[in-house]
Amino acid sequence: QVQLVESGGGLVQAGGSLRLSCAASGSLFNFDAMGWWRQAPGKQRELVATITIGGMTNYADSGKGRFTISRDNIKNTVYLEMNNLKPEDTAVYYCNGRRVTIWGPWGQGTQVTVSS
């Protein structure tokens, strides 16, 4: 089973940027798509961005124009570049892979905190 490990979170001021990384223990081609999710305190986990095996991307409205998902198939790593961060972006961010319609098990995530 391919393991996914998130990193890159931290504390940043509003308007700042962060780049999250998701390192896979095996090939990203094991998944039809990769995605970044987030869960804020007291809220449900939400899908932030996805990138397919062919490189097609999709974003939730909350991140459009500010977030960019990308993948490096050589390094088996998925990234989430986040710009112009807002306090409402504060959450634990998770990386996951999808096979057909099924998302895999959740990892530890990485905490992103945006101060106002």
Image (tube, rainbow, N blue to C red):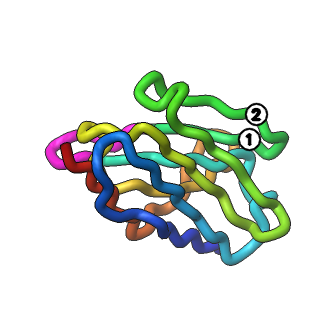
4 or 114, which lies in front? 114
Q: The disc labelled 2 sits on which kind of residue? A: Met
Q: Report the side of 30 relative to 114 (left or right).
A: right
> Magenta region, mostly helix, strand or loop?
loop
Which residue appears at 59% of the width and 73% of the height? 3
Q: Is residue 45 magenta?
A: yes
Q: The disc labelled 1 sits on which kind of residue? A: Thr
Which residue appears at 15% of the width and 44% of the height? 42
- Image location of residue 10, percent across then percent down: 35, 64
Residue designated by label 2? 56
Which residue appears at 30% of the width and 43% of the height? 14
Image quadrant holding the C terminus, namely top left
- Image location of residue 4, percent across then percent down: 57, 69
Q: Report the side of 56 relative to 44 (left or right).
A: right
The correct choice, above or below, for 68 with respect to 63 in the image is below
Verify CB contact (< 8 Å) between mark 2 and mark 1: yes
The circle on residue 52 is 1
Q: Which residues are magenta?
A: 40-46
